[in-house]
Image: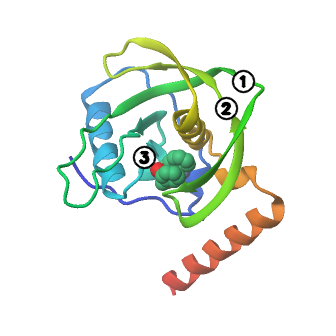
Amino acid sequence: MVLRPLVILPDSQLRLVSKPVEAVTPAIRTLVEDMFETMYDAPGIGLAAIQIGEPVRVVTIDLSKPAPEGEPPAPKEPQVFINPQVTWSSEELNVYEEGCLSIPEYYEEVERPARIKVRFMDLDGATREIEADGLLATCLQHEIDHLDGVLFIDHLSRLKRERVTKKFAKAAKRSAA
Ligand code: K2U
Ligand code: ZN
């Protein structure tokens, strides 16, 4: 398992449409291991492969709560979604303050369908479908957006989106100088 550098806004890789996975190969298994290593280290509760520069339709999620300071580590609950597709979403909406490992230290409220059904391939290559609500629904929609080159700031007002895009473009320019 390798810690991989995160792709950060305004890197244009984040706007790529990731390619479907044909089969669960050893390379895909290694990618998933690297994604979990990088996600837990960030720390984050979700990660899309493009966020470590791999334009393939793979998402890792773990909503388990970290143990309080000084307590033994809580059991992990890793979930892998390969080629995830939303097959149904509720009319009812939910608002959640989202962040993104590729847009560090920026949080804004985003409205999304409260419940969704997602069809995907698991690590055994089996096709599965789950119904998600709450934080899992929000996180899955956030990650599936990543696979289509969409960022959570694309769901904000143009003013807010332009402000944060300019901020990260300036920071990138400063660090390149
Ligand atoms: O895709 C990512 O950047 C991973 C996000 C996933 C996420 C975004 C919005 C809402 C839930 C999950 C990171 O885990 S960002 C860290 C985080 C954790 C909990 C809530 C919000 C953001
Ligand atoms: Zn993100």
Residue 123 in sight: yes
In the picture shown, does residue 104 fall above or below 32?
below
Q: What amino acid is at disc 3?
A: Ile
Q: What amino acid is at disc 2?
A: Ala
Mark 2 → mark 3, Cα distance in angstroms: 18 Å
Q: Earlier in the sequence, mark 2 or mark 3?
A: 3
Q: Is residue 63 left or right of residue 25?
A: right
**Considering the numbered disc 3 on the image, is that residue within a helix, a strand or a loop?**
loop
Q: Quickly name the residue at label 1.
A: 90
Q: Which mark is residue 44?
A: none
Judged from this view, the residue extending furthest toward the right is 158
Q: Is residue 95 left or right of residue 29?
A: right
Q: Quickly name the residue at label 2.
A: 114
Q: Earlier in the sequence, mark 1 or mark 2?
A: 1
Crowdedness of circle 2 by 10 Å Cα count: few (<14), some, many (20+)? many
Which one is in front, 43 or 151? 43
Q: Quickly name the residue at label 3.
A: 45
Residue at (59% x, 46% y) in the render: 16
Q: Is residue 176 left or right of residue 23?
A: right
Residue at (76% x, 55% y) in the render: 156
Dot 1 and dot 2 residues touching (CB under 8 Å)? yes
